[in-house]
Image (spheres, rainbow, N blue to C red):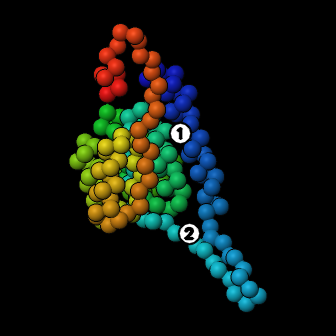
Amino acid sequence: KPLSETAAVDIVTGADVLEYYAGLIPALEGSQIPLRDSSFVYTRREPLGVVAGIGAWNYPIQIALWKSAPALAAGNAMIFKPSEVTPLTALKLAEIYSEAGLPDGVFNVLPGIGAETGQYLTEHPDIAKISFTGGVASGKKVMANSAASSLKEVTMELGGKSPLIIADDADLDLAAD
């Protein structure tokens, strides 16, 4: 990816996400809803606890922030598993969070091979939620492992649209594959 796209998209939009969720923190409170004169319903938002994010390689800082900013704003601790080809970005983000005053152990980076590390996170009983970005086949494994271990919550951003032009002399079967 060109450096210009990294600077203009990955870093800038990642910073925007962080600013947005930081601004939401004061609004993350419960509400009181009157039912009748003598009764009401009260809602209260509570952190889930430890959540995990599993990121992709294509926008490493943006994806790490899409996953960590809302989790941290809601009061959770996060274990983030970056793509095995872009671990340094997440490690740098951990340094930035630490320099900003985030306590040790609140944002943790767990580099590793996707299938092994991802399986460990999705099956771990103390992780309450998984947020995954990646391919459909891996997403199916994340969902199956998460459901089998403790029926944890899962959110996913799977696959993508990649339009391309196929020349007249191209192998259509190969291009479709």
Rendered location of residue 80, percent (x, y): 38, 49
Rendered location of residue 39, percent (x, y): 69, 87
Residue 120 vs residue 45: left or right? left
Q: Amino acid at mark 2?
A: Arg
Residue furthest right as drawn: 37
Rendered location of residue 138, percent (x, y): 31, 45
Above or below residue 40? Residue 126 is above
Q: Residues within 10 Å of mark 2 (few under 14, many from 20)?
A: few
Instruction: Find residue 45 and name its label.
Output: 2
Above or below residue 14? Residue 68 is below
SS for dot 1: helix
Residue furthest top as drawn: 169
On the image, which quarter does residue 152 sit in? bottom left
Residue 137 vs residue 24: left or right? left
Q: Residues within 10 Å of mark 1 (few under 14, many from 20)?
A: many
- If the image is split into quadrants, where does the C terminus sit? top left
Q: Amino acid at mark 1?
A: Gly
Rendered residue at 44%/53% (across/down): 155
Rendered residue at 40%/48% (across/down): 132
Residue 100 visible? The answer is: yes
- If the image is split into quadrants, where does the N terminus sit? top left
Q: Earlier in the sequence, mark 1 or mark 2?
A: 1
Q: Which residue matches tag 1?
A: 14
Q: CA distance from mark 1 to mark 2?
A: 25 Å
Instruction: Find residue 172 and name its label.
Output: none
SS for dot 2: loop
